[in-house]
């Protein structure tokens, strides 16, 4: 489901590096950048499923913790998209010190490398779902207080602050996009990446849906195509804002998602298993997206039911090709 | 200049640990806690000058990076005052990754130790002078945006966020005090701790005053006795706020400080050397202290000219006892 060229800026000949190019967002972004004319290098632990990755994307295997590999990857790049994370928002038994060391300290060392290589701009995948924590009012704007209740969220917020510091100290340009709950094709069910993928998988298998808490938790679901489009606009944005929300701007309860999945997959009346709520889950998360819609031509263009429908179609097709699924399960986040 | 008992709560028999007990704030706080009846242990790299430390304070030599030493220090403690930092706000050539590793990651590992030892409360010395960065309006309240422009400030802010996370995840109680520019007796001129100490030292030696930038930078100077008193109130505070500013609530330009120092030390017409402004210096910093004055009986009680006068007296006496000065110069921050 490629993004229409009219919905995104051209990036002809611009050398773009994606850190985390084999993940859910990484593969979509790499392909979109290639379509918009950029010269794309994708960096990750292992090659992404070659079936998914555009043939014009140069794959670069390496570990984020290896300064030689990242220095080599960054060389000559103009725009770096930093999507890598060693953890996901809902990691059970998350250890804050581990998250800090791998994600925050790892990113700082990487920023030093980008700085030395005179990278023009960093576009950072921050987390609109976790940096704010429990909010007083909804939708949540970029100026709302930030009280994250997960190590993942504190780490993302700390990286934003260090990006601000590097901009101040060294002039490094950056944009941090605070992304809501992304969903869509290629989202892995093996890496706890998203409730939509997990529930779709269960529904298509005829298994009970697994729901944390009462199911009344509200989230802002944004289609991966819209997220990718926001990254393309961020790559060329020249205004003064450095932190922008990216979401649908609307909220859906998990129970509503379950209902819609049942309706779309024709699996109504699946049983639902309710599990104890997770400590890192805020009750409501809906992002105010007025800033990015004011500052760029970006709009969320994929409607929820249409997006869910195409995601279900993709997943149903994937279930009939388990080898490809397996290969993707081993690809890096 | 002990704090009057009426200005601070009694802490009879409460076991208090000060991490960084040999520094400027640490020694003052240790002595005040002892006077208020607490059982005080002070932890640091080397014993503080025994002439300055109250005889009732138990000194505990150790390195913050040594988990065995900190585990031993924390054992049986009820309240932990965390004042340690490997850097100071104006550190030249500050390396963000080093600051993150030593201060933030070091603190996270320390919080795990406090958690395991069932410490009741952490009182953290945060930095009102650096966590906000350049502000839009003054005085700066706790809800203002935080855009630090020094590694020191980002690190302090990140620690605040991790404290919030540990409170959420593990119920660890904490208060973070965002301190303005503290000054007063015992402040070291060797560790770049404060402009007041540095300028007083030069004035008393008849040397030109060294001023960064134009001297029109404005700071909120708060006497160390008032800072200590805020820590005592924070130790017993039972309200909902976890982050509070501690300052005088008023601003003074560096040139005004220089004028006042010349007047008080009788060294008028000293020449002034103006140096290039430092990149980590915000133009203005004045803290809004209405929250802490609403939530606790704390007030700033030392007036600027009186506080400056007694600090000058202390420093003049110290200059006549260089051995003691030398010993203090080697004590840990």
Image: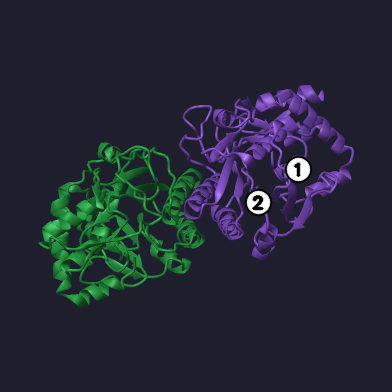
Chain colours: A purple, B green
Residue A269 appears at what percent x and percent y? 77, 22
Q: Is residue B324 left or right of residue A137?
A: left
Instruction: Determine the CA span between mark 2 and mark 1.
Output: 14 Å
Q: Which labelled disc corresponds to residue A78?
A: 2
Confirm whether residue B4 shows in the render. Answer: no
Residue B324 appears at what percent x and percent y? 21, 74
Residue at horizontal 32 percent and vertical 46 percent from the top: B284
Above or below: residue B151 compared with residue A28: below
Above or below: residue B88 compared with residue A137: below
Label 2 secondary element = loop
Residue B224 appears at what percent x and percent y? 23, 55
Confirm whether residue A235 shows in the render. Answer: yes
Residue at horizontal 18 percent and vertical 70 percent from the top: B205
Above or below: residue B56 compared with residue A292: below
Q: Nearer the viewer, residue A322 or B188?
A: B188
Name the image quarter holding residue A245: top right
Chain bearing mark 2: A
Residue at horizontal 32 percent and vertical 44 percent from the top: B245
Question: Dot 1, how many residues are within 10 Å of its Cα: few (below 14), some (14-19), or many (20+)?
Answer: some
Question: Dot 2, how many residues are within 10 Å of its Cα: few (below 14), some (14-19), or many (20+)?
Answer: some
Q: Earlier in the sequence, mark 2 or mark 1?
A: 1
Q: Nearer the viewer, residue A190 or B70?
A: A190
Q: Is residue A276 left or right of residue A196?
A: left
Q: Quadrant of the N terminus of chain A?
A: top right
Q: Which residue is mark 1?
A: A37
For this orientation, the residue located farthest to the bottom is B323
Residue A149 appears at what percent x and percent y? 52, 42
């Amino acid at each position: 489901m490629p993004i229409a060229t009219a919905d995104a800026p051209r990036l002809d000949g611009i050398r773009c590096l994606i850190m985390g190019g084999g993940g859910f967002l990484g593969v979509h972004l790499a392909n979109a950048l290639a379509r918009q004319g950029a010269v794309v290098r994708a960096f990750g632990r292992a090659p992404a499923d070659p079936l998914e990755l555009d043939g014009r994307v140069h794959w670069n295997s390496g570990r984020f913790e290896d300064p030689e590999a990242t220095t080599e990857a960054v060389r000559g790049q103009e725009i770096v998209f930093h999507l890598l994370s060693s953890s996901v928002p809902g990691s059970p038994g998350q250890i804050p010190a581990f998250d800090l060391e791998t994600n925050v300290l790892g990113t700082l060392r990487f920023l030093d490398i980008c700085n030395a290589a005179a990278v023009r701009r960093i576009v950072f995948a921050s987390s609109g779902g976790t940096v704010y924590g429990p909010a007083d009012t909804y939708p949540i704007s970029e100026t709302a207080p930030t009280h994250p209740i997960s190590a993942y969220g504190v780490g993302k917020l700390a990286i934003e602050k260090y990006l601000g510091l590097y901009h101040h100290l060294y002039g490094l340009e950056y944009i941090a996009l605070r992304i809501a709950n992304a969903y869509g094709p290629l989202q892995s069910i093996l890496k706890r990446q998203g409730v939509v993928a997990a529930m779709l998988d269960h529904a298509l298998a005829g298994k009970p849906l697994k729901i944390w808490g009462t199911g009344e938790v509200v989230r802002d679901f944004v289609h991966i195509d819209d997220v990718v489009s926001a990254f393309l606009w961020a790559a060329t944005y020249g205004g003064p804002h450095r932190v922008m929300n990216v979401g649908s701007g609307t909220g859906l309860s998990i129970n509503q998602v379950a209902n819609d999945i049942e309706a779309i997959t024709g699996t109504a009346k699946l049983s639902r298993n309710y599990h104890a709520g997770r400590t890192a889950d805020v009750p409501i998360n809906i992002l105010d997206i007025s800033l990015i819609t004011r500052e760029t031509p970006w709009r969320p263009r994929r409607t929820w039911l249409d997006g869910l429908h195409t995601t279900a179609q993709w997943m149903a097709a994937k279930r009939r090709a388990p080898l490809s699924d397996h290969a993707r399960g081993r690809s890096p986040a």
